[in-house]
């Protein structure tokens, strides 16, 4: 199968570009899901797997990297690529790992149910009307454990069933409908979770017979590891059971990502023995030519004109810093480019009158309600929500709101302090972080004037 333009820079719509620029102006690290800089081994690996996606065997890839090196960016790039090439009839289903569901097959069945019901129903109707069609070819000829889904498979392809009935029978397979009565309604014996693996094979083979291929892109497996190592080991065993069924599935592709901190071999040696050659690593961007390409790309995206020689200056500066992750590299480039950017945040904000109006209204309401007089709560409530509820992984339990008005980024080993009044204890607090928490890099945010009025306007 040909993939024209794969790994080229993809087209980005205007709305996405506006978001990238606003994130950059506000100091956030912009997502760049439309280009992959360097990573030639990874590209070669994925390209080879994609070339076999319509073959007679399912394949898998596990992408390993440190936090911030671009695992999610690879998945988002592939998602955008296949969204722009619908003629390939490849559906990429992106999701993040569910720490509560460690049976990987059932999890992937849920993804099919949520995203591919239309294709499955149409596939069943198309295949049952095909001359000499034998549903057994979709289920390992009902050999071994596939014998348990024989009656279910034959019922699914029964002539005359309408769309609603086909849908409900598919739901019996995915587990959305599971009661004994729901099965009896169609004259079937109740299936159990033990049978879901064979059902998964059946559904993927239906899609393959109708020239659809699925890429399951499951991100952040390390979330399961963070929950418990035992849970991670159980998940890997489930993954292994799925890999053992690959030779009965007609094509398709499973890509997962996980951090280098998780030692797969120590948690499940049988699984590692099966997938060792399917693991590919993202490396840090260190070559000057790659860094220069990234600088020029970001300058173009952000509409920043770079004077002659500036690119090499930025590259030299970043190379000397030896940054810990590719995300930090992108952040550093963005900060360097700000020196060449002539539009202030206020000017950018003024371009959008709706946002400006919302800002002014919010400020007026806060002032009238006395909200500007308690900035500690007004600031830390949303910050705490962002860091904890939205799962900013670098923080974990290192939010020290009550005693220090600070938090620690565990990746950069840096503490961030926020002062809202004349705090003469700041030196002592910094010394405590040095002595007790092993932190020696600090960023301290203070208003220009330590008064209620001025703090409310910063």
Image: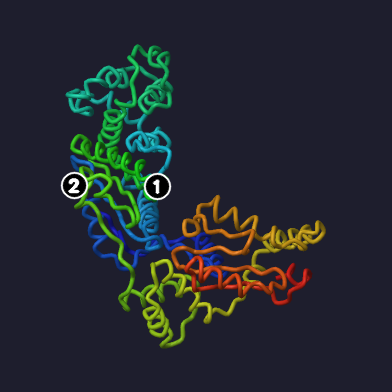
State the colouring used for the structure image. rainbow
Q: Nearer the viewer, residue 138 or 87?
A: 138
Question: Do the numbered discs 1 and 2 sit on residues whose CB atoms are within 8 Å?
Answer: no
Please provide percent x and percent y for residue 456. 74, 67
> What SS does tag 1 mark?
strand
Q: Which mark is residue 94?
A: 1
Location of mark 2 (residue): 273
Q: In the picture, which quadrant includes the C terminus?
A: bottom right
**As drawn, is 325 to the left or to the right of 350?**
left
Local crowd size for mark 1, using a 10 Å CA cut-off: few (<14), some (14–19), many (≥20): some
For marks 1 and 2, the one nearer the N-term is: 1
Please provide percent x and percent y for residue 13. 48, 60
| Farthest residue, direction front | 435
Q: Which quadrant of the view contains residue 245?
A: top left
**As drawn, is 197 to the left or to the right of 116?**
left
Where 430 falls versus 214 (above or below)? below
Q: Nearer the viewer, residue 119 or 325?
A: 325
Q: CA distance from mark 1 to mark 2?
A: 26 Å
**As drawn, is 41 to the left or to the right of 423?**
left
Q: Which quadrant of the view contains residue 209?
A: top left
Kindly identify the residue that appears in the image at 25 percent across and 49 percent down.
266
Please provide percent x and percent y for residue 275. 21, 48
Where 27 falls versus 133 (above or below)? below
**As drawn, is 136 to the left or to the right of 345?**
left
Q: Which mark is residue 204?
A: none
Kindly identify the residue that appears in the image at 26 percent across and 57 percent down.
280
Q: Which quadrant of the view contains residue 248?
A: top left
Kindly identify the residue that appears in the image at 43 percent across and 36 percent down.
114
Please provide percent x and percent y for residue 365. 78, 57
């Amino acid at each position: 199968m040909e993939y024209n333009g794969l790994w080229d820079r993809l087209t980005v719509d205007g709305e996405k570009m506006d978001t990238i620029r606003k994130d950059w102006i506000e100091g956030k690290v912009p997502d760049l899901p439309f280009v992959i800089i360097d990573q030639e081994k990874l590209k070669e690996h994925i390209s080879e797997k994609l070339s076999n996606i319509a073959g007679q065997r399912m394949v898998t890839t596990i992408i390993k990297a440190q936090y911030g090196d671009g695992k999610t960016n690879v998945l988002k790039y592939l998602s955008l690529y296949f969204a722009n090439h619908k003629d390939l009839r490849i559906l990429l289903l992106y999701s993040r790992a569910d720490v509560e569901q460690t049976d990987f097959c059932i999890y992937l069945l849920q993804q099919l149910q949520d995203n591919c019901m239309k294709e499955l129903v149409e596939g069943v109707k198309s295949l049952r009307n095909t001359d000499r069609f034998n549903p057994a070819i979709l289920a390992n000829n009902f050999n071994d454990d596939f014998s348990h889904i024989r009656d279910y498979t034959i019922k699914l392809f029964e002539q005359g069933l309408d769309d609603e009935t086909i849908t409900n029978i598919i739901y019996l397979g995915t587990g959305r409908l599971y009661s004994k009565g729901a099965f009896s309604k169609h004259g079937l014996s109740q299936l159990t979770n033990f049978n879901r693996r064979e059902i998964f094979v059946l559904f993927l083979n239906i899609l393959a017979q109708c020239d659809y291929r699925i890429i399951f892109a499951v991100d952040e497996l390390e979330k399961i590891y963070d929950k418990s190592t035992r849970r991670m080991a159980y998940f890997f065993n489930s993954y292994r059971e799925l890999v053992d069924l690959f030779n009965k599935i007609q094509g398709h592709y499973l890509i997962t990502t996980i951090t280098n901190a998780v030692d797969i071999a120590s948690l499940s040696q049988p699984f590692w023995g099966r997938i060792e050659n399917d693991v590919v690593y993202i490396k840090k961007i260190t070559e000057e030519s790659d860094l220069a390409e990234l600088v020029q790309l970001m300058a173009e995206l952000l509409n920043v004109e770079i004077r002659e020689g500036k690119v090499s200056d930025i590259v030299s500066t970043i190379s000397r810093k030896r940054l810990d992750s590719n995300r930090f590299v992108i952040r550093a480039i963005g900060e360097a480019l700000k020196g060449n950017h002539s539009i202030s945040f206020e000017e950018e904000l003024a371009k959008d009158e709706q946002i400006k109006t919302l800002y002014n209204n919010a400020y007026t309401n806060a002032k009238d309600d006395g909200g500007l007089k308690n900035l500690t709560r007004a600031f830390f409530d949303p910050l705490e929500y962002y860091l904890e509820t939205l799962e900013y992984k670098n923080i974990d339990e290192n939010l020290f709101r009550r005693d220090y008005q600070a938090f620690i980024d565990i990746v950069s080993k840096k503490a961030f302090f926020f002062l809202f009044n004349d705090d003469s204890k700041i030196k002592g607090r910094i010394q405590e972080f040095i002595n007790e928490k092993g932190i020696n890099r600090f960023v301290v945010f203070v208003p220009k004037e330590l008064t209620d009025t001025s703090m409310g306007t910063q």
